Amino acid sequence: MTAINLIAPKRKISDGFCVWLTGLPAAGKTTIAKALQTELEKRGRVVTMLDGDGAMRQVLSTGLGFTKDDRDLNVRRAGFVAGEVVRHGGAVICALVSPYADARGFVRRMIDTAFVEVYVQTPLHVCEKRDPKGLYRRARAGELEHMTGIDDPYEESDPHVLNLQIDGERPVEKNVCVIATYLENRGLLERVSNPAALMIGRYQPWHDGHRALFMQALEMEGYVVIGVRETYGLSDKNPFTFAEVKARIEESLSAFVGSFEIRRLPNITNIVYGRDVGYRITRVGLGPEIEGISATQIRSTLNVVGKPYGVEWKDQVRLSS
Ligand SMILES: Nc1ncnc2c1ncn2[C@@H]1O[C@H](COP(=O)(O)OP(=O)(O)OP(=O)(O)O)[C@@H](O)[C@H]1O
Ligand SMILES: [Mg+2]
């Protein structure tokens, strides 16, 4: 292995970070990297992209092949450039197979807490089926050596150091949302202060009427916070736990992931406001049919007798109209 001696930057400039996407060829790294770039740019960040597919291999790592030594050097070069950008407060996305855990560890030590390793986990058979560059086919035919997943290994990181593992078969927007939220929670990315609507209710159970209201709220503000109140005791009026209510809502709104969040609230019994609060309170008319849906009535039809809290929502509550 080529010996190099890079000194880890001592000073961390808070704004900088490096999202390092690693995974098998065709796992979806470039696809996620591009969508994440768009999202970060929408939020006003300037993004440096170091993608193994692009100019990187042609310029930065020209002449390198795919042996372990060459791949590791490729990773260290990308890591060094990324570290420099991070030190100056920049956002960097790296999308490289980077199959060896020790080489990724080297970059992690260099970039320190601003390094976010994201493993794009896509099963080999899925990658092989995608095979947009025909590499798996060529490797299987014996025309290509050092193909990760075929005759070279992919080493997963120790789960204690890995920052995020994402499912490469999920829609790209969902993965971008997971990464952005992770960055926000780590304080590496500012939360967006976009408008949001708040719906407060018990949702015992969440039904079509709530969903219709959610759709209106989403249309009005683009993001919805669903506050679930009175979640602390189980009774005939509140037969479901917060976890059950939340799971039900998440299932009902699975097509809108990233456009809502569910918060557990105390038993809010009054909304009090003074002047100039900066928000509106809007009564939404949904028409007699939707407004006629009643959670009380639904509860009365649920088979809660003798099994009040473990009731199967799915079987008993109509979800969509
Ligand atoms: N979530 C997804 N669902 C379905 N197909 C996807 C998904 N993400 C990516 N793909 C498709 O899989 C193929 C490989 O994606 P991509 O080029 O992003 O992989 P990669 O990890 O960057 O691969 P490489 O290491 O070879 O650069 C592309 O054809 C892409 O359109
Ligand atoms: Mg790629």
Image (tube, rainbow, N blue to C red):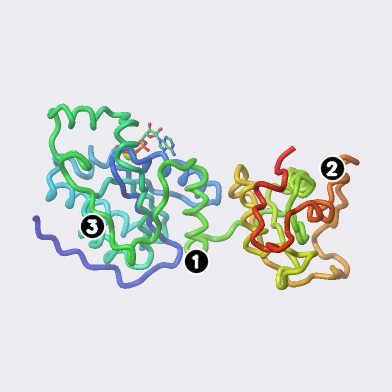
Counting from the top left corner in percent of width and height, residue 11 is at 35, 72
Q: CA distance from mark 3 to mark 2?
A: 55 Å
Assess whether mark 1 and mark 3 are in contact (beta carbons under 8 angstroms).
Answer: no
Residue 294 at least partly seen: yes
The residue carrying mark 3 is 101
Indicate which label's residue lies in the foreground, 3 or 1. 3
Q: Tell me the SS state at disc 3.
A: helix
The earlier-in-sequence mark between 3 and 2 is: 3
Confirm or reject: label 1 Cβ below 8 Å from ligand 1.
no
Identify the residue at horizontal 71%, vertical 68% (top origin).
231
Q: Which mark is residue 290?
A: 2
Counting from the top left corner in percent of width and height, residue 128 is at 29, 34
Assess whether mark 1 and mark 2 are in contact (beta carbons under 8 angstroms).
Answer: no
The amino acid sitting under disc 1 is Gly
The amino acid sitting under disc 3 is Ala
Q: CA distance from mark 3 to mark 1?
A: 26 Å
The residue carrying mark 1 is 187
Indicate which label's residue lies in the foreground, 2 or 1. 2
Residue most toward the front?
A: 306
Quadrant (top left/top right/bottom left/bottom right) for the C terminus = top right
Q: Residues within 10 Å of mark 1 (few under 14, many from 20)?
A: few
Counting from the top left corner in percent of width and height, residue 135 is at 23, 31
Counting from the top left corner in percent of width and height, residue 50 is at 33, 46
The earlier-in-sequence mark between 2 and 1 is: 1
The amino acid sitting under disc 2 is Ile
Q: CA distance from mark 2 to mark 1?
A: 41 Å
